[in-house]
Amino acid sequence: QRCSDMTGRIIRGIGGFYYVAVASSGMTEGQPDIYECHARGIFRKDGKKPLVGDYVEIEPVPDEHGLIGRIEGFLPRKNELIRPAVSNVDQAIVVFAIRSPEPSLVLTDSFIIQMMMQDIPVILLFNKKDLADKDYAVSLAEIYGDSGVKAYPVSARDEEDVRMIKGMLDGRTSILAGPSGVGKSTLLNAVCPGASMETGEISKKLKRGKHTTRHSELFAVSEDTYLMDTPGFSAFGVPDMDPEELKVYYREFFPYEGSCRFNGCSHTHEPDCAVRHAVYAGEVNRNRYENYCSLYDELRSRKRYR
């Protein structure tokens, strides 16, 4: 590493420009310096594409208009997600609304499966709990009690809930995902008040007006805590897989595997299915089972028309 190089983290990428946050004199007010960078052509030749979340080495380039640099190298990635295309993620915060709009639990399961496929732990937040009675809010979270996912009813406007969410984020890089209208922006601004201002500053610096197509963006909640907003993540349905693989992502079924009459039971229609018996007995949540059947049918249909 040359003495002129410095290390930072890519917080945003637009049209070949990468915005790299570097801890420097700007950190005196708790904010890093942001360098606008190009990646060296050799990376493109090697098929290496910088991702939001990457730790990189940059070389500053003298420029009278601001902080400009060039990406000279990549630090090793802890992980790399395909959808969304980001790196170095510790967990996913998936947000749905309790009311307005009503949550689609099938879509919720699709989000969870996408993250499980990439070995990313999931925390599920049902936002806008103030719009529903407490029992309903709690029962919604309890659907996921045996799924391996932590689920909580919250309100982005409740100070105690915001403190709890900040605690979940502490010391980690988290993806913030979910469909539009569920209060993600309110939640983002509650835990990271400078987020909307930071986005505006970068848009102004680009001198290209507001971008209608939003991109993944990384926000510093504190020095070692980051929240990654991933707009457009809600557009994906259930990930492509063999229908028989789906049950691997429903942990509630695990205690009953091997107890069905047929080996390779799909748990959808076969006689003497231990999972179906468990659903009827109230041992496996009926909502989760119905979501599974819906996604299984979708995958079967998709396979049929290939």
Image (cartoon, helix red, strand yellow):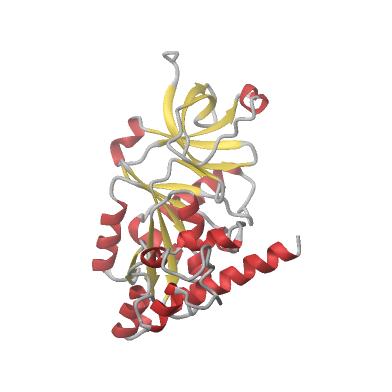
Is residue 221 at least partly visible in the picture? no
**Left or right: residue 213 compared with residue 95:** right
Rendered location of residue 49, percent (x, y):
60, 34
Report the residue that reaches farthest toward the top.
2
**Residue at 56% across, 41% down:** 13
Which sits in the foreground, 86 or 241? 241
- Residue 305 is left or right of residue 143, and the answer is right
* Residue 272 visible in rendering: yes
Residue in front for this viewpoint, 42 or 18: 42
Note whether 224 is above or below 115 in the view shown: above
- Furthest toward the right, the residue is 305
- What residue appears at the point 46 percent right and 39 percent down from the top-left corner? 79
**Quadrant in the picture for the C terminus:** bottom right
- Total labels: the figure holds 0
Q: Which x, y percent locates residue 209?
A: 63, 51
Task: Give the quadrant of residue 192.
Answer: bottom left
Q: Does residue 7 lie above or below 160 as drawn? A: above
Residue closest to the eye, 248 or 162: 248
**Residue 53 or residue 36, whichever sits in front:** 53
Measured from the top left, where is residue 234 in percent x and y?
Answer: 56, 63
Residue drawn 51% across the image and 74% down it: 291
Image check: 257 left or right of 266? left
* Residue at the (39%, 63%) spot, across then down: 254
Residue at the front extreme of this rendering? 261
Q: Position of residue 97 (x, y in %)?
A: 44, 74
- Left or right of 96? Residue 27 is left
Quarter holding residue 51: top right
Quadrant where the N terminus sits is top left
